[in-house]
Protein backbone atom coordinates (compact mmCIF):
# COMPACT_ATOMS: atom_id res chain seq x y z
CA UNK A 1 0.00 0.00 0.00
CA UNK A 2 1.34 3.42 -0.97
CA UNK A 3 1.65 5.80 1.96
CA UNK A 4 -0.40 8.86 0.96
CA UNK A 5 -1.17 12.05 2.86
CA UNK A 6 -4.82 12.68 3.76
CA UNK A 7 -7.04 15.69 3.48
CA UNK A 8 -10.70 16.16 4.28
CA UNK A 9 -12.75 17.07 1.19
CA UNK A 10 -15.77 17.97 3.29
CA UNK A 11 -14.38 21.36 4.22
CA UNK A 12 -16.00 22.64 1.01
CA UNK A 13 -19.01 20.30 0.52
CA UNK A 14 -20.53 22.41 -2.23
CA UNK A 15 -17.42 22.17 -4.38
CA UNK A 16 -16.59 25.87 -4.07
CA UNK A 17 -13.21 27.12 -2.95
CA UNK A 18 -12.38 29.46 -0.06
CA UNK A 19 -11.65 33.13 -0.82
CA UNK A 20 -8.61 33.89 -2.92
CA UNK A 21 -6.89 35.65 -0.04
CA UNK A 22 -6.54 32.34 1.88
CA UNK A 23 -2.84 31.64 2.22
CA UNK A 24 -1.69 28.68 0.09
CA UNK A 25 1.92 27.63 0.56
CA UNK A 26 3.87 27.10 -2.69
CA UNK A 27 4.60 23.54 -3.80
CA UNK A 28 8.21 22.33 -4.02
CA UNK A 29 9.91 21.17 -7.20
CA UNK A 30 7.74 18.12 -8.00
CA UNK A 31 6.38 16.36 -11.07
CA UNK A 32 2.61 16.26 -11.56
CA UNK A 33 0.69 14.33 -14.21
CA UNK A 34 -3.05 14.75 -14.70
CA UNK A 35 -5.38 12.36 -16.51
CA UNK A 36 -8.62 14.17 -17.27
CA UNK A 37 -11.92 13.07 -18.75
CA UNK A 38 -13.44 16.49 -19.47
CA UNK A 39 -12.11 19.52 -21.27
CA UNK A 40 -13.27 21.76 -18.39
CA UNK A 41 -11.14 19.91 -15.83
CA UNK A 42 -8.15 19.87 -18.17
CA UNK A 43 -8.48 23.65 -18.58
CA UNK A 44 -8.60 24.14 -14.80
CA UNK A 45 -5.49 22.00 -14.32
CA UNK A 46 -3.69 23.84 -17.12
CA UNK A 47 -4.54 27.18 -15.52
CA UNK A 48 -3.34 25.88 -12.14
CA UNK A 49 0.00 24.98 -13.71
CA UNK A 50 0.46 28.64 -14.60
CA UNK A 51 -0.16 29.80 -11.02
CA UNK A 52 2.89 31.18 -9.20
CA UNK A 53 2.52 28.64 -6.37
CA UNK A 54 3.12 25.81 -8.82
CA UNK A 55 5.94 27.66 -10.54
CA UNK A 56 8.49 25.01 -9.57
CA UNK A 57 6.28 22.03 -10.39
CA UNK A 58 6.48 20.26 -13.74
CA UNK A 59 2.91 19.60 -14.91
CA UNK A 60 1.78 17.36 -17.75
CA UNK A 61 -1.86 16.86 -18.79
CA UNK A 62 -3.36 13.94 -20.72
CA UNK A 63 -6.91 12.95 -21.52
CA UNK A 64 -8.37 9.50 -20.89
CA UNK A 65 -8.87 9.44 -17.12
CA UNK A 66 -8.16 6.36 -15.01
CA UNK A 67 -7.73 3.95 -17.93
CA UNK A 68 -5.10 6.14 -19.58
CA UNK A 69 -3.17 6.42 -16.28
CA UNK A 70 -3.10 2.65 -15.74
CA UNK A 71 -1.89 2.07 -19.28
CA UNK A 72 0.74 4.83 -19.11
CA UNK A 73 2.38 3.54 -15.93
CA UNK A 74 2.69 -0.07 -17.04
CA UNK A 75 5.93 0.92 -18.76
CA UNK A 76 6.86 4.26 -17.17
CA UNK A 77 7.72 5.40 -13.64
CA UNK A 78 5.06 7.34 -11.76
CA UNK A 79 5.54 11.05 -10.88
CA UNK A 80 5.34 12.64 -7.43
CA UNK A 81 1.64 13.44 -7.89
CA UNK A 82 -1.05 11.88 -10.08
CA UNK A 83 -4.36 13.67 -10.67
CA UNK A 84 -7.18 11.39 -11.83
CA UNK A 85 -10.59 12.50 -13.02
CA UNK A 86 -13.41 9.96 -12.98
CA UNK A 87 -17.16 10.29 -13.45
CA UNK A 88 -18.36 7.04 -11.87
CA UNK A 89 -18.19 5.35 -8.47
CA UNK A 90 -17.39 1.71 -9.16
CA UNK A 91 -14.65 2.52 -11.65
CA UNK A 92 -12.87 4.69 -9.06
CA UNK A 93 -12.26 1.81 -6.64
CA UNK A 94 -11.56 -0.77 -9.33
CA UNK A 95 -9.24 1.57 -11.17
CA UNK A 96 -7.33 2.50 -8.02
CA UNK A 97 -6.76 -1.18 -7.22
CA UNK A 98 -5.27 -1.63 -10.69
CA UNK A 99 -3.24 1.58 -10.42
CA UNK A 100 -1.73 0.44 -7.10
CA UNK A 101 -0.06 -2.47 -8.90
CA UNK A 102 1.92 -0.15 -11.17
CA UNK A 103 2.45 2.85 -8.84
CA UNK A 104 5.87 3.61 -7.35
CA UNK A 105 6.16 3.98 -3.58
CA UNK A 106 5.77 7.59 -2.46
CA UNK A 107 3.50 8.68 -5.30
CA UNK A 108 0.48 10.68 -4.17
CA UNK A 109 -2.90 10.54 -5.84
CA UNK A 110 -5.60 13.21 -6.12
CA UNK A 111 -8.99 12.05 -7.39
CA UNK A 112 -11.47 14.44 -9.00
CA UNK A 113 -14.95 12.93 -8.99
CA UNK A 114 -18.65 13.77 -9.04
CA UNK A 115 -19.93 11.50 -6.27
CA UNK A 116 -20.45 13.36 -2.99
CA UNK A 117 -20.52 10.47 -0.51
CA UNK A 118 -18.64 10.11 2.78
CA UNK A 119 -18.60 6.30 2.45
CA UNK A 120 -16.80 6.63 -0.86
CA UNK A 121 -14.33 9.05 0.71
CA UNK A 122 -13.57 6.54 3.47
CA UNK A 123 -12.96 3.85 0.88
CA UNK A 124 -10.59 6.17 -0.98
CA UNK A 125 -8.72 6.96 2.23
CA UNK A 126 -8.44 3.24 3.01
CA UNK A 127 -6.84 2.73 -0.38
CA UNK A 128 -4.39 5.55 0.31
CA UNK A 129 -5.76 8.43 -1.77
CA UNK A 130 -4.36 11.82 -0.78
CA UNK A 131 -7.31 14.04 -1.67
CA UNK A 132 -10.76 13.75 -3.21
CA UNK A 133 -12.04 16.90 -4.90
CA UNK A 134 -15.63 17.29 -6.09
CA UNK A 135 -16.11 18.29 -9.70
CA UNK A 136 -16.50 20.77 -11.27
CA UNK A 137 -13.16 22.18 -10.11
CA UNK A 138 -11.65 25.61 -10.61
CA UNK A 139 -8.04 26.73 -10.75
CA UNK A 140 -7.69 27.38 -7.03
CA UNK A 141 -9.18 23.97 -6.15
CA UNK A 142 -6.36 22.31 -8.08
CA UNK A 143 -3.66 24.63 -6.71
CA UNK A 144 -4.86 24.13 -3.14
CA UNK A 145 -5.05 20.37 -3.49
CA UNK A 146 -1.54 19.96 -4.93
CA UNK A 147 0.11 22.44 -2.56
CA UNK A 148 -1.74 20.95 0.41
CA UNK A 149 -0.01 17.62 -0.11
CA UNK A 150 3.28 19.19 0.92
CA UNK A 151 2.00 21.18 3.91
CA UNK A 152 1.51 18.73 6.76
CA UNK A 153 -1.14 19.91 9.26
CA UNK A 154 1.27 19.47 12.16
CA UNK A 155 4.04 21.41 10.43
CA UNK A 156 4.80 25.02 11.21
CA UNK A 157 2.91 27.39 8.92
CA UNK A 158 4.86 28.44 5.86
CA UNK A 159 5.89 32.08 6.05
CA UNK A 160 4.02 34.79 4.16
CA UNK A 161 6.11 37.03 1.89
CA UNK A 162 5.12 40.70 1.63
CA UNK A 163 6.86 42.71 -1.08
CA UNK A 164 6.96 46.52 -0.84
CA UNK A 165 8.19 48.53 -3.82
CA UNK A 166 8.19 52.16 -4.90
CA UNK A 167 6.46 53.26 -8.07
CA UNK A 168 9.35 55.69 -8.56
CA UNK A 169 12.68 56.33 -6.91
CA UNK A 170 12.66 58.53 -3.82
CA UNK A 171 9.01 58.01 -2.83
CA UNK A 172 9.89 56.56 0.58
CA UNK A 173 9.06 52.91 -0.11
CA UNK A 174 11.94 51.66 2.06
CA UNK A 175 10.89 53.86 4.97
CA UNK A 176 7.35 52.53 4.74
CA UNK A 177 8.57 48.94 4.42
CA UNK A 178 10.67 49.25 7.56
CA UNK A 179 7.94 50.94 9.59
CA UNK A 180 5.27 48.46 8.46
CA UNK A 181 7.56 45.56 9.40
CA UNK A 182 8.08 47.20 12.79
CA UNK A 183 4.30 47.38 13.29
CA UNK A 184 3.87 43.74 12.25
CA UNK A 185 6.48 42.65 14.77
CA UNK A 186 5.66 44.99 17.65
CA UNK A 187 1.91 45.54 17.47
CA UNK A 188 0.82 42.26 15.88
CA UNK A 189 3.47 40.22 17.76
CA UNK A 190 4.35 38.30 14.59
CA UNK A 191 7.93 37.09 14.17
CA UNK A 192 9.19 38.91 11.08
CA UNK A 193 12.30 39.55 9.03
CA UNK A 194 13.09 42.48 6.73
CA UNK A 195 15.15 41.53 3.68
CA UNK A 196 16.83 44.59 2.17
CA UNK A 197 17.19 43.73 -1.52
CA UNK A 198 18.91 46.98 -2.50
CA UNK A 199 22.40 45.57 -2.05
CA UNK A 200 24.24 48.68 -3.26
CA UNK A 201 22.27 51.44 -1.53
CA UNK A 202 19.99 49.77 1.03
CA UNK A 203 19.02 51.79 4.11
CA UNK A 204 17.47 49.16 6.41
CA UNK A 205 20.65 48.93 8.50
CA UNK A 206 20.63 52.71 9.04
CA UNK A 207 16.90 52.88 9.76
CA UNK A 208 17.11 50.14 12.42
CA UNK A 209 20.45 51.41 13.76
CA UNK A 210 22.15 48.11 12.92
CA UNK A 211 25.58 47.51 11.44
CA UNK A 212 25.85 43.74 10.90
CA UNK A 213 29.06 42.28 9.50
CA UNK A 214 27.12 39.80 7.35
CA UNK A 215 23.86 40.04 5.46
CA UNK A 216 21.94 39.08 2.37
CA UNK A 217 24.96 39.43 0.04
CA UNK A 218 26.69 36.52 1.78
CA UNK A 219 23.70 34.33 0.94
CA UNK A 220 23.10 35.43 -2.64
CA UNK A 221 26.79 34.98 -3.58
CA UNK A 222 26.98 31.57 -1.85
CA UNK A 223 23.79 29.78 -2.97
CA UNK A 224 25.23 26.33 -2.23
CA UNK A 225 25.57 27.20 1.46
CA UNK A 226 22.04 28.51 1.94
CA UNK A 227 20.13 26.57 4.61
CA UNK A 228 18.32 27.41 7.83
CA UNK A 229 21.44 27.51 10.00
CA UNK A 230 23.33 29.68 7.51
CA UNK A 231 20.50 32.20 7.17
CA UNK A 232 20.10 32.36 10.97
CA UNK A 233 23.75 33.41 11.28
CA UNK A 234 23.17 36.25 8.82
CA UNK A 235 20.14 37.71 10.62
CA UNK A 236 20.58 40.75 12.83
CA UNK A 237 18.19 40.99 15.78
CA UNK A 238 16.34 44.32 15.95
CA UNK A 239 13.63 43.47 18.53
CA UNK A 240 12.21 40.33 20.12
CA UNK A 241 10.03 39.73 17.06
CA UNK A 242 11.95 41.52 14.29
CA UNK A 243 15.15 40.51 12.50
CA UNK A 244 17.05 42.09 9.62
CA UNK A 245 18.75 40.59 6.60
CA UNK A 246 20.78 43.65 5.78
CA UNK A 247 22.26 44.87 2.50
CA UNK A 248 26.01 45.57 2.42
CA UNK A 249 25.45 49.06 0.88
CA UNK A 250 28.92 49.00 -0.65
CA UNK A 251 30.08 49.55 -4.22
CA UNK A 252 33.13 47.26 -4.30
CA UNK A 253 31.28 44.89 -6.62
CA UNK A 254 28.34 44.96 -9.01
CA UNK A 255 25.10 43.20 -8.13
CA UNK A 256 23.93 41.64 -11.35
CA UNK A 257 21.81 38.58 -10.65
CA UNK A 258 19.83 36.00 -12.56
CA UNK A 259 16.06 35.82 -12.15
CA UNK A 260 16.24 32.95 -9.62
CA UNK A 261 19.13 34.30 -7.53
CA UNK A 262 17.04 34.91 -4.40
CA UNK A 263 14.78 31.84 -4.62
CA UNK A 264 16.72 29.67 -2.17
CA UNK A 265 16.93 32.55 0.34
CA UNK A 266 13.19 33.19 0.22
CA UNK A 267 12.38 29.47 0.44
CA UNK A 268 14.59 29.10 3.51
CA UNK A 269 13.12 32.19 5.19
CA UNK A 270 9.62 30.79 4.62
CA UNK A 271 10.44 27.73 6.71
CA UNK A 272 11.61 29.74 9.74
CA UNK A 273 9.73 33.05 9.75
CA UNK A 274 5.94 33.61 9.75
CA UNK A 275 6.36 36.95 7.94
CA UNK A 276 9.02 38.11 5.48
CA UNK A 277 8.97 41.74 4.33
CA UNK A 278 10.92 42.37 1.12
CA UNK A 279 12.24 45.88 0.63
CA UNK A 280 12.36 45.77 -3.19
CA UNK A 281 14.44 48.49 -4.90
CA UNK A 282 12.94 50.57 -7.70
CA UNK A 283 14.45 48.83 -10.70
CA UNK A 284 13.10 46.47 -13.34
CA UNK A 285 15.00 43.22 -13.83
CA UNK A 286 14.29 39.51 -13.92
CA UNK A 287 14.79 39.02 -10.19
CA UNK A 288 12.80 42.07 -9.05
CA UNK A 289 9.87 41.04 -11.25
CA UNK A 290 10.12 37.48 -9.93
CA UNK A 291 10.21 38.72 -6.31
CA UNK A 292 7.03 40.74 -6.85
CA UNK A 293 5.11 38.12 -8.81
CA UNK A 294 5.96 35.32 -6.36
CA UNK A 295 5.12 37.31 -3.21
CA UNK A 296 1.95 36.53 -1.27
CA UNK A 297 1.01 40.20 -0.86
CA UNK A 298 2.29 43.36 -2.55
CA UNK A 299 2.27 47.02 -1.57
CA UNK A 300 3.16 49.71 -4.13
CA UNK A 301 4.22 53.08 -2.68
CA UNK A 302 3.57 56.15 -4.82
CA UNK A 303 3.90 59.91 -4.52
CA UNK A 304 0.93 61.98 -5.77
CA UNK A 305 2.28 63.00 -9.20
CA UNK A 306 1.77 61.97 -12.83
CA UNK A 307 4.87 59.77 -13.21
CA UNK A 308 3.96 57.82 -10.08
CA UNK A 309 0.39 57.41 -11.33
CA UNK A 310 1.59 56.00 -14.65
CA UNK A 311 4.12 53.66 -13.01
CA UNK A 312 1.67 52.47 -10.38
CA UNK A 313 -0.88 51.59 -13.03
CA UNK A 314 1.73 49.76 -15.11
CA UNK A 315 2.93 47.71 -12.12
CA UNK A 316 -0.64 47.13 -10.96
CA UNK A 317 -1.81 45.88 -14.37
CA UNK A 318 1.20 43.60 -14.84
CA UNK A 319 0.82 42.01 -11.41
CA UNK A 320 -2.91 41.46 -11.85
CA UNK A 321 -2.28 39.73 -15.18
CA UNK A 322 0.60 37.65 -13.77
CA UNK A 323 -1.29 36.64 -10.60
CA UNK A 324 -4.90 35.96 -11.68
CA UNK A 325 -5.63 33.73 -8.67
CA UNK A 326 -4.18 36.03 -6.01
CA UNK A 327 -5.44 38.98 -4.08
CA UNK A 328 -4.96 42.23 -5.99
CA UNK A 329 -1.88 44.35 -5.19
CA UNK A 330 -2.39 47.18 -2.72
CA UNK A 331 -1.00 50.68 -3.01
CA UNK A 332 -0.63 53.71 -0.78
CA UNK A 333 0.20 57.36 -1.37
CA UNK A 334 3.17 58.86 0.47
CA UNK A 335 4.50 62.40 0.98
CA UNK A 336 1.03 63.87 0.51
CA UNK A 337 0.66 67.60 1.08
CA UNK A 338 4.06 69.05 0.13
CA UNK A 339 3.63 72.83 0.35
CA UNK A 340 3.16 74.61 -3.02
CA UNK A 341 3.48 71.36 -4.97
CA UNK A 342 0.65 70.51 -7.39
CA UNK A 343 -0.59 67.01 -6.60
CA UNK A 344 -2.91 64.40 -8.04
CA UNK A 345 -5.43 63.56 -5.34
CA UNK A 346 -6.38 60.10 -4.13
CA UNK A 347 -9.68 60.03 -6.02
CA UNK A 348 -7.88 60.56 -9.34
CA UNK A 349 -5.48 57.75 -8.49
CA UNK A 350 -8.41 55.50 -7.61
CA UNK A 351 -10.20 56.33 -10.86
CA UNK A 352 -7.16 55.54 -13.02
CA UNK A 353 -6.13 52.37 -11.19
CA UNK A 354 -9.68 51.23 -10.39
CA UNK A 355 -8.74 50.67 -6.77
CA UNK A 356 -8.62 52.90 -3.70
CA UNK A 357 -5.30 53.54 -1.93
CA UNK A 358 -5.17 51.85 1.47
CA UNK A 359 -3.55 54.93 3.02
CA UNK A 360 -2.48 58.50 2.23
CA UNK A 361 0.56 59.26 4.39
CA UNK A 362 1.12 62.98 4.98
CA UNK A 363 4.34 64.86 4.28
CA UNK A 364 6.00 65.22 7.70
CA UNK A 365 9.66 66.15 6.99
CA UNK A 366 10.57 66.99 10.58
CA UNK A 367 9.36 63.70 12.05
CA UNK A 368 10.57 61.43 9.25
CA UNK A 369 13.92 63.26 9.07
CA UNK A 370 14.50 62.90 12.81
CA UNK A 371 13.63 59.20 12.69
CA UNK A 372 16.00 58.57 9.77
CA UNK A 373 18.92 60.47 11.33
CA UNK A 374 18.45 58.77 14.72
CA UNK A 375 18.01 55.25 13.36
CA UNK A 376 14.48 55.02 14.79
CA UNK A 377 11.00 54.12 13.65
CA UNK A 378 8.16 56.65 13.57
CA UNK A 379 6.47 54.75 16.43
CA UNK A 380 9.55 55.41 18.58
CA UNK A 381 9.57 59.11 17.71
CA UNK A 382 5.82 59.63 18.20
CA UNK A 383 3.83 56.61 19.33
CA UNK A 384 0.46 58.38 19.15
CA UNK A 385 0.94 60.16 15.84
CA UNK A 386 -1.62 59.47 13.10
CA UNK A 387 1.13 58.16 10.82
CA UNK A 388 1.99 55.49 13.39
CA UNK A 389 -1.64 54.38 13.30
CA UNK A 390 -1.51 54.30 9.48
CA UNK A 391 1.47 51.95 9.54
CA UNK A 392 -0.44 49.64 11.87
CA UNK A 393 -3.48 49.70 9.57
CA UNK A 394 -1.26 48.86 6.57
CA UNK A 395 0.31 46.01 8.56
CA UNK A 396 -3.13 44.65 9.38
CA UNK A 397 -4.25 44.78 5.74
CA UNK A 398 -1.11 43.05 4.49
CA UNK A 399 -1.14 40.27 7.08
CA UNK A 400 -4.90 39.86 7.49
CA UNK A 401 -4.52 40.11 11.27
CA UNK A 402 -6.20 42.29 13.84
CA UNK A 403 -4.38 44.40 16.34
CA UNK A 404 -3.09 42.69 19.47
CA UNK A 405 -4.83 44.24 22.41
CA UNK A 406 -2.50 46.12 24.70
CA UNK A 407 -3.13 46.24 28.46
CA UNK A 408 -4.59 49.54 29.60
CA UNK A 409 -1.98 51.66 31.32
CA UNK A 410 -2.55 52.66 34.93
CA UNK A 411 -2.14 56.27 36.05
CA UNK A 412 0.58 54.90 38.37
CA UNK A 413 2.58 53.48 35.45
CA UNK A 414 5.06 56.41 35.19
CA UNK A 415 5.82 56.18 38.91
CA UNK A 416 6.25 52.39 38.76
CA UNK A 417 8.63 52.73 35.78
CA UNK A 418 10.76 55.23 37.71
CA UNK A 419 10.93 52.90 40.71
CA UNK A 420 11.95 49.99 38.48
CA UNK A 421 14.67 52.13 36.92
CA UNK A 422 16.12 52.83 40.38
Image: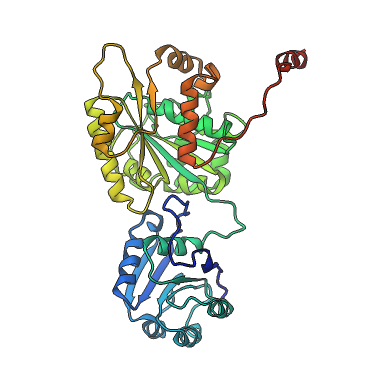
Q: Is residue 192 above or below residue 85?
A: above
Quadrant placement of the N terminus: bottom right
- Residue found at x 40% / y 26%: 250
Q: How many marks?
A: 0
Quadrant placement of the C terminus: top right
Residue 188 spot, x, y in % from top left: 57, 35
Image quadrant in which you'd find residue 42: bottom left
- Residue found at x 36% / y 56%: 51
Residue 59 spot, x, y in % from top left: 36, 66
- Is residue 204 at all visible to an observer of this figure? yes
Residue 83 spot, x, y in % from top left: 42, 73
- Is residue 218 at all visible to an observer of this figure? no
Q: Nearer the viewer, residue 30 or 168?
A: 168
Q: Is residue 291 above or below residue 252?
A: below
Specify how the rendered protein is coloured: rainbow
- Residue found at x 34% / y 43%: 287
Side of 142 where 311 appears, left or right? left
Image quadrant in which you'd find residue 217: top left
Q: Is residue 413 above or below residue 268?
A: above
Residue 100 spot, x, y in % from top left: 50, 83
Q: Nearer the viewer, residue 97 or 137?
A: 137
- Residue found at x 53% / y 50%: 158
Amino acid sequence: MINYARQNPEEQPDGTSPPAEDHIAPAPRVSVQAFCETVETAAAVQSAGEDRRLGKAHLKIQMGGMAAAIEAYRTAPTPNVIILETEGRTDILTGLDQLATVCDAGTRVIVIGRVNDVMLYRELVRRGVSDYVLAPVNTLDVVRSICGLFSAPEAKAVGRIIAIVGAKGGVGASTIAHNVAWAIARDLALDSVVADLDLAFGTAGLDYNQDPVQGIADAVFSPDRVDTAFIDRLLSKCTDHLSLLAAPATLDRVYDFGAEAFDSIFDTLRTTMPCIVLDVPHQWSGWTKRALVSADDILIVAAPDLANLRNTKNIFDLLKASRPNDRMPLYCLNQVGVPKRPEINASEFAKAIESEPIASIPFEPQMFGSAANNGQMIAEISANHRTTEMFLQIAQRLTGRGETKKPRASFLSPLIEKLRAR
